Amino acid sequence: MGSVEVPSRHKALIYDNPGSISTKLEEIETPKPGVNEVLINLTHSGVCHSDMGVMTNSWAWLPAPTRKGQVGGHEGVGTVAAFGSGAESSGLKIGDRVGIKWMASACGNCIPCLAGADACCTAGKISGYYTPGTFQQYALAPAHYVTPIPDALPSDAAAPMLCGGVTVYSALVKSGARPGDWVVIPGAGGGLGHLALQIGARGMGFRMIGIDMGEKEKLVKECGAEVFFDLSKYGRDDEGTKKLVEDVKEATGGVGAAAVVVCTASNAAYAQGLSFLKFRGTLVCVGVPEGDAVPIATADPASILALEKRIVGSAVGNRKDAIDTLEMAARGLVKTHFETQPMSKLTEVFERMDKGKLQGRVVLDLSG
């Protein structure tokens, strides 16, 4: 099996003031793997909008506020550094590259797990929320639940695929769209959206429409959107929404889209999304709005039943989705547009994210 030297302490980024955008770089004790666990020497971690939701306590659906000192992060890639008792039987070897996802572990026995929806496990542990996450140099994970990283995929490029890529791949599958169908992506220039465009256009044969702010048009079109709509050119009132709906319908030949995959946390995007759909079209809920819950304004039963529209929830993806997404990335069909930042810049990254100034993703280099 071989062995590597594991330090007694390592660097980690903690949420030092949950409820606000603030992180602190500290040195913490390196844990020892328990039964059926592996210790992973993490080299890279993606930074996701979900991390900000956890850090700032802006998700009302989570059962408790994030605790002070929590290590965040859930898109980690690294190498197996040590085994706990029984973990060797997993087939892993010291030095194997593996990833940690949003769901850090799943029981395998609850109803969602038995249905192949382990990301919805009723006993699952979320990475970076009451379970130490991937914004650190060493982390524990169940040996059976880590994701193997293909040899052809660099670790920094693989990290955002473990949440962003898996999430939109699973959502596009659930959309029911078929090759040649129009699919609309609100939030197209963001971390999720730019991956959804590529997977949809290049991996699934969909015709993609991107919606976002004007400065993201170049990125959105590079990622496979045939049509782009600049939100800044539409008012936030009913007239602006009506014009956007009309323009989307016109772009699809007047019939509407087969699917809308909402890749933003905007309540407005959800309110508009159902109106973009054609007969038997599907709205897939991916982005999690922050603050108090706001109903989808256009989700009146009459309009839904008349055109037999569907609303589908999609929470990340399962282990098979993760493997499929990484294989797609290894083949070059989807590439994360990302910038690499040191651990010391995480608070700054979150501040840029909060202002909507990020294009694509940020990946932390955890080497120091």
Image: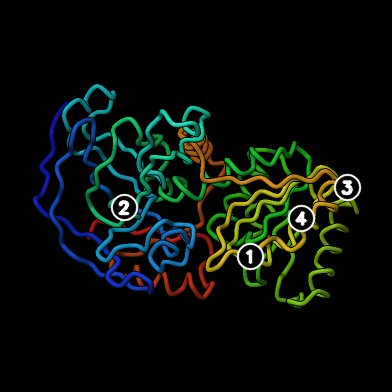
Q: Which amino acid does the dot numbered 1 rest on?
A: Val
Q: CA distance from mark 4 to mark 3?
A: 13 Å
* Badge 4 element: helix
Earlier-in-chain disc, 1 versus 2? 2
Residue at screen point 51% across, 35% down: 117
Give residue 11's quadrant in the image: bottom left
Q: CA distance from mark 3 to mark 2?
A: 46 Å
Residue at label 4?
274
Residue at label 3?
306
Earlier-in-chain disc, 4 versus 1? 4
Q: Which mark is residue 294?
A: 1
Q: Which amino acid does the dot numbered 4 rest on?
A: Leu
For label 2, the crowd category at 10 Å Cα-Cα, with few meaning under 14, some 14 to 19 and many 20 or more, is many
Quadrant location, the N terminus: top left
Look at the numbered discs 2 and 4 and tell me whether their residues touch, using CB distance below 8 Å. Answer: no
Q: Which amino acid does the dot numbered 3 rest on?
A: Ala
Residue at label 2?
134
